[in-house]
Image: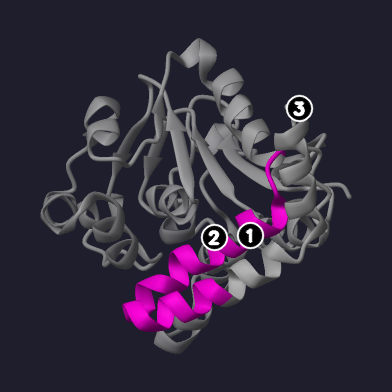
Amino acid sequence: MSWETIGLEKKENIGILTLNRPERMNAFNEKMEAEVVQALQEADQDEEVRVLVVTGAGKAFCAGADMGRMSGEERRPKGAEEFRRGFRNIQGIILGLQRLEKPTIAMINGAAVGGGFDLACACDLRTGSENTRFMVAFTRIGLFPGWGGTWLYPRIIGIPKAAEMLFTGDFLEAKDAERLGLLNKLVPAADLEKETMNLAGRIANGPPIAIRLAKMQLYKGLEMDLETAMKVAAACETITLTSEDHREGVKAFQEKRKPQYKGR
């Protein structure tokens, strides 16, 4: 399919979704919102894609919503209800990333501010370089962070630091982001793509069924008590115990070779 504001490619079992409006720091307009929603659906349906990497073209990861939408370059909604409905695609993107059965990695090549910060947090893993920085831009212009940040930030970096960022709108630099666990990997900018793809490749070569079930329970478990979580875990492990992938994993271990998982 031909895209106007994004790129979507596949390298073996790795999908790569690139926000492609570098002249606007990859800020979202209505077209990009719709295209990202569709791209996530395609990645979800493509059985060959086992991991999805999300990144930005140029020097920025994502600047959130395009300020042109607020200054009148795009038509403004007529009232509060139309504003509310206008969040549907953004909600579809944030929820789509978390609900995607396949692991997601945000390769944060530059600034991730406002909704771009939320987009990065909606991914399962995050890699960055010395050029990576985060900021709650909503606060700077008198807005509530409406892309899910108040739910996402405290679960990743803890309540005190989330509160500081939400209340001040200050930047969080790459080294502090790594220390807080927001970045899984911090590498030199020249190595960011290589290291991210290595990480994605290790995941893509793993057992798809086990990994997808693990992702599901990683988030659903936040809503459960331990007893319920243990019962769900037993059901999930039963699925993997009866899979071809499990038999292949055991056989590969016995034969001292790398397993070839098929997702069956």
Looking at the image, can residue 83 be seen? no
Q: Name the mark nearer the viewer: 1 or 3.
A: 3
Q: Secondary structure at mark 2?
A: helix
Question: Residue 215, which numbered label?
Answer: 2
Give the foreground label among 2 and 3. Answer: 3
Check if residue 208 falls in the magenta segment: yes
Judge from the rendering whether residue 40 lies leftward or rightward of residue 110; answer left or right.
Answer: right
Identify the amino acid type marked 2: Lys
Answer with mark 1 or mark 3, whichever residue precedes in sequence: 1
Cα distance in 3D space between marks 1 and 2 = 5 Å
Compared to residue 80, the image places residue 63 above or below, namely: above
Quickly name the residue at label 3: 257
Q: Is residue 53 above or below residue 242?
A: above
Q: Magenta residues, as a range? A: 205-234
User: In the picture, which quadrant includes the C terminus?
Assistant: bottom right
Residue 193 shows which numbered tag?
none
Q: Amino acid at mark 1?
A: Arg
User: Who is closer to the viewer here, 238 or 146?
Assistant: 238
| Residue 4 screen position, x and y as percent | 76, 46
